[in-house]
Amino acid sequence: MMRKNKSVRDRWLTVRLSEEEEKKVTTLASKTTAPSLSEYARYTLLREPVIVLFRNQSADDFLTEMLLLKKELHAIGNNFNQAVHRLHTLDHDPQVKVWAERYEPLLHSFNQKTKEIQDKLQQIYQQWSQE
């Protein structure tokens, strides 16, 4: 197995910065995928591409709200399923049986729409978490 030769960095470049400049450079470096300030400085000085991380706060807030909504929809669906199942067990009352049969398509529709919403939220979450 061949190992990739790493170039030895044995040369120093000293740069003096004011406290404000240092904070600015450190902040810029922290918003990238560079593992260290030195790596960020090399990328920048050698004009190599620097990948900048971008977080959209409004998108993050939206995603947080949608995840809460997803949990609530799941809980409502579970409660509805349990209620309809319980009604099916009370088949000795003909009115209850008629009611349960009448609302069975609504339950199916609700479950289907809830699943679509959950799938869409999952897609959005995956898309945003990769950016």
Image (spheres, helix red, strand yellow):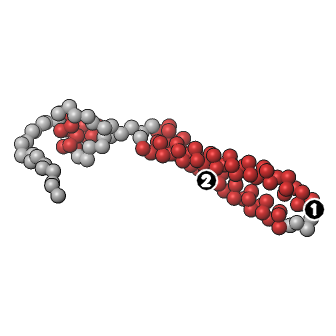
Which residue is more in the foreground, 73 or 15?
Answer: 73
Q: Is residue 115 above or below residue 14?
A: below
Q: Secondary structure beneath disc 2?
A: helix
Q: Is residue 57 left or right of residue 84?
A: left
- Which x, y percent locates residue 68? 59, 50
Quarter of the rendering containing residue 42: top left
Q: Amino acid at mark 1?
A: Pro
Q: Nearer the viewer, residue 36 or 112?
A: 112
On the image, the x and y values in percent for residue 111 come to 70, 51
Image position, residue 91 (x, y; %): 88, 66
Label number found at residue 94: 1
Q: Are marks 2 and 1 in contact (CB under 8 Å)?
A: no
The front one of 80 and 113 is 113
Question: Looking at the picture, how far across and down is residue 24, in whole percent?
Answer: 27, 36
Q: Left or right: 85 with respect to 50?
A: right
Name the residue located 69 percent from the left edge and 58 percent from the top edge: 78
Q: Which residue is mark 2?
A: 71
Q: Residue furthest right?
A: 94
Q: With 93 as the anchor, is 26 left or right in this view?
A: left
Q: Is residue 70 above or below residue 45?
A: below
- Mark 2 or mark 1: whose residue is earlier in sequence: 2
Q: Nearer the viewer, mark 2 or mark 1?
A: 1
Mark 1 secondary-structure assignment: helix
**Which quadrant, please, contains the C terminus?**
top left
